[in-house]
Image (cartoon, rainbow, N blue to C red):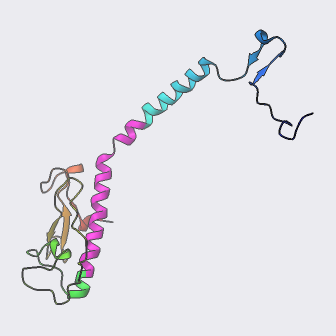
Amino acid sequence: MPTNHDVGADLGPRCHGDQSRPKVRSCSGFTLIEVMVVVVILSILAAIVVPKIMDRPDEARITKARQDIRAIEAALNLYKLDNFIYPTTDQGLEALVQPPSVAPEPPKWKQGGYMDRMPQDPWGHPYMYLAPGDQGRAFDLYSLGADGQPGGADAAADIGNWSLN
């Protein structure tokens, strides 16, 4: 007499045919050819997609630099709200991390700073800061790009707060 567990439970192999003659069974499943076709299709897709993904490290670094510049710019604006001026070029961006040691001394520098630490750009160079800025702004904040030199094109181009959208 079957129990409740046995009802509808087919734990045997997925085979069709006469169960009394085991040599004449046909099992359902994937054939070697079907598996090979799937592997070939996946390989073709990988050959198309992977180079497009791997070809974008420069774009990722440029995007990271823009994000860093926006974050530093926000910290500079908080500094100005507290102290009524931006740090000078001589005080630099370190004025956001620790109290400046160069005059003018900020009257209400925030205990703990405005940033935990000053990040480097994605190419390992420090961000550049100039106050007042040369680009018609209160300050210029920029990365020198991949080459670490002023100017340049593509990944080597300067990325500054004057060019952010």
Q: Nearer the viewer, residue 4 or 97?
A: 4
Q: Which residues are magenta?
A: 50-78
In the displayed structure, 67 sits above or below 110; it is above
Residue 67 magenta-highlighted: yes
Residue 115: horizontal and vertical position, in percent?
25, 73
Residue 86: horizontal and vertical position, in percent?
18, 81
Q: Nearer the viewer, residue 54 or 27?
A: 27
Q: Find residue 2 and report its image quarter.
A: top right
Residue at the farthest right position: 1
* Residue drawn at (21%, 52%) of the image: 123
Location of the N terminus by quadrant is top right
* Residue drawn at (87%, 41%) of the image: 4
In the displayed structure, 89 sits above or below 20; it is below
Q: Find residue 76 and report its image quarter.
A: bottom left
Location of the C terminus by quadrant is bottom left
In the displayed structure, 9 sits above or below 13; it is below
Q: Nearer the viewer, residue 109 or 12?
A: 12
Magenta stretch, main secondary structure, is helix
Q: On the rendered structure, is 11 left or right of 69?
A: right
* Residue drawn at (20%, 75%) of the image: 96
In the displayed structure, 27 sits above or below 99; it is above
Residue 32 magenta-highlighted: no
Q: On the rendered structure, is 149 left or right of 50?
A: left
Q: Nearer the viewer, residue 129 or 79?
A: 79
Residue 155: horizontal and vertical position, in percent?
23, 50
